[in-house]
Image (cartoon, rainbow, N blue to C red):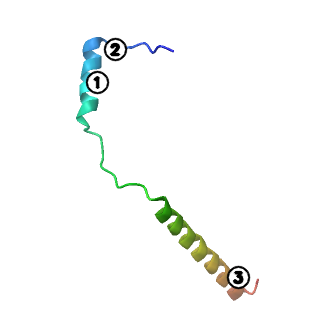
């Protein structure tokens, strides 16, 4: 599938030049999935302990 260019060549050159500048690029730290997994486990465990404690204090469990 050939993609047609909808811009004039001068305008496309301006767009290409702007994209090469990297004005909107942001330096980010590398993604660490194990850290995310650890945080999720801590949060879920904490909420579980809280809900069990709350149920025991209410006399439900």
Check disc 3 and report its element: helix, strand or loop.
helix
Q: How packed is label 1: few (under 14 Cα within 10 Å), some, or many (20 or more)?
A: few
When the figure is inspected, residue 52 is found, relative to residue 44, above or below; the finding is: below
Q: Position of residue 32 (x, y in %)?
A: 44, 59
Q: Nearer the viewer, mark 3 or mark 2?
A: 2
Q: Residue at x 25, y 19 (%)?
A: 13
**In the image: residue 2, left or right of residue 18:** right
Q: Secondary structure at mark 2?
A: loop
Which mark identifies residue 55?
Answer: 3
Disc 2 + disc 1, Cβ < 8 Å:
yes
Gap in angstroms between the C-alphas marked 3 and 1? 60 Å
Q: Which residue is mark 2?
A: 7
Q: Quick one: label 3 or label 1, which is nearer the N terminus?
A: 1
Where residue 4 sits: x, y (%)? 43, 12
- Residue drawn at x 62%, y 80% is 49
Going from the N terminus, do you reach mark 3 or mark 2 first? 2
Q: Quadrant of residue 17?
A: top left
- CA separation, marks 2 and 1? 9 Å
Point out residue 55 in the picture as x, y percentages from the top left corner: 70, 82
């Amino acid at each position: 599938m050939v993609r047609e260019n909808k811009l004039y060549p001068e305008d496309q050159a301006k767009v290409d030049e702007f994209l090469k500048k990297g004005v909107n690029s942001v330096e980010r730290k590398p993604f660490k999935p194990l850290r995310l997994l650890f945080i999720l486990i801590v949060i879920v465990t904490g909420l579980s302990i809280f809900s069990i404690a709350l149920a025991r204090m209410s006399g439900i469990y």
